Amino acid sequence: MDFREKLRIEPASSVKLADIDPSFHGNIKDKDEGKAELSAVLDEITPLQEKLYAEKKHALLIVLQGIDAAGKDGVCWHVIRAMNPQGTYVASFKQPTETEKAHDFLWRVHQRTPALGQVAVFNRSHYEDVLVARVHNLVPERVWSKRYRQINHFEEFLSENGVSIVKFFLYISKDEQLDRFEKRLEDKERQWKISGSDYSERERWDDYIAAYEDMLSKCSTEHAPWYVLPANRKWFRNLAAAKIIHQTLLDMQIETPTPTVDLDEIYRKYHHAVRNG
């Protein structure tokens, strides 16, 4: 299955999340098969990311958005682990500081975009400014409604300067979210993840779904597509993300850079001299 074709939101389409099954798993039979495929894909991502870092002609920005407990951290653990930390980092955008508030909403984001050769993962992103800001009325509609266009221009600018962008919306059902909250409550090793806001935000579920649908409809573009990852099954979520990242890296046509020194001279001057000294 071509996950990019199946899960991609076409530009200018009208998204209704009720039409998407969050338990979808394609033609992957079960968890064991999914994990085996994931392991194989991660093995192919690693050398591609190493060449990306060495060549320094391209960059990759991975955006993760999703309602609480959808698995943004899980994607980082199970997919991004395939990449060398030397050329990869994770950034998160939550409540802005006073300094950040004094600038335009994209100011703090631009500072964390990847340089050529790097992979950046936004675990929550600039889209918080059309999600939380909208749902909680942090700014008036006349402000946040303009941000879709501003975000599209920003991402187009990044794309034209060598940054490939993939955006994942991790989609779980309301029942699945409650089940995951309950499992956190029961697991002493994960209770630290619980916050009161998880439940208060859950009361705004419908408002968030409406905001996500507008985000997907207005901001999936040719240069920065949105993918809706059915995330009720964690193993499928991870596999779909990995396969889309892998194909995106392949499309960059990354090449191992040529040496910057005279290899024959290095052999003659150092290795040959040492071995025959």
Image (cartoon, rainbow, N blue to C red):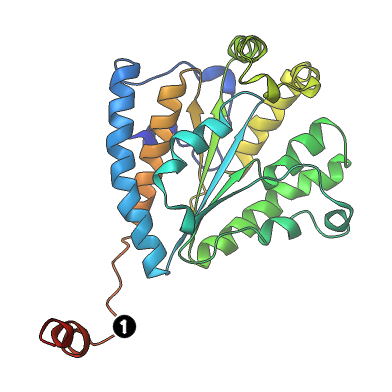
Q: Residue at x 60, y 14 (%)?
A: 180
22 or 259, nearer to the observer: 259
Q: Residue at x 69, y 47 (%)?
A: 126
Dividing the image into 4 quarters, which one contains the C terminus?
bottom left
Measuring from the top left, give residue 156's x and y in whole percent. Answer: 57, 59
Q: Residue at x 80, y 20 (%)?
A: 196
18 or 165, nearer to the observer: 165
Instruction: Judge whether residue 147 can be spotted in this image.
Output: yes
* Helix, strand or loop under label 1: loop
Q: Residue furthest left?
A: 276
Image quarter of residue 100:
bottom right
Look at the picture and state if 108 lies above or below 239.
Answer: below
Look at the picture and state if 59 lies above or below 266.
Answer: above
Measuring from the top left, give residue 166's x and y in whole percent. Answer: 49, 46
Instruction: Judge whether residue 1 can be spotted in this image.
Output: no
Amino acid type shown at disc 1: Thr
Measuring from the top left, give residue 173's x and y in whole percent. Answer: 58, 15
Q: Residue furthest front?
A: 277
Q: Which residue is mark 1?
A: 260
41 or 152, nearer to the observer: 41
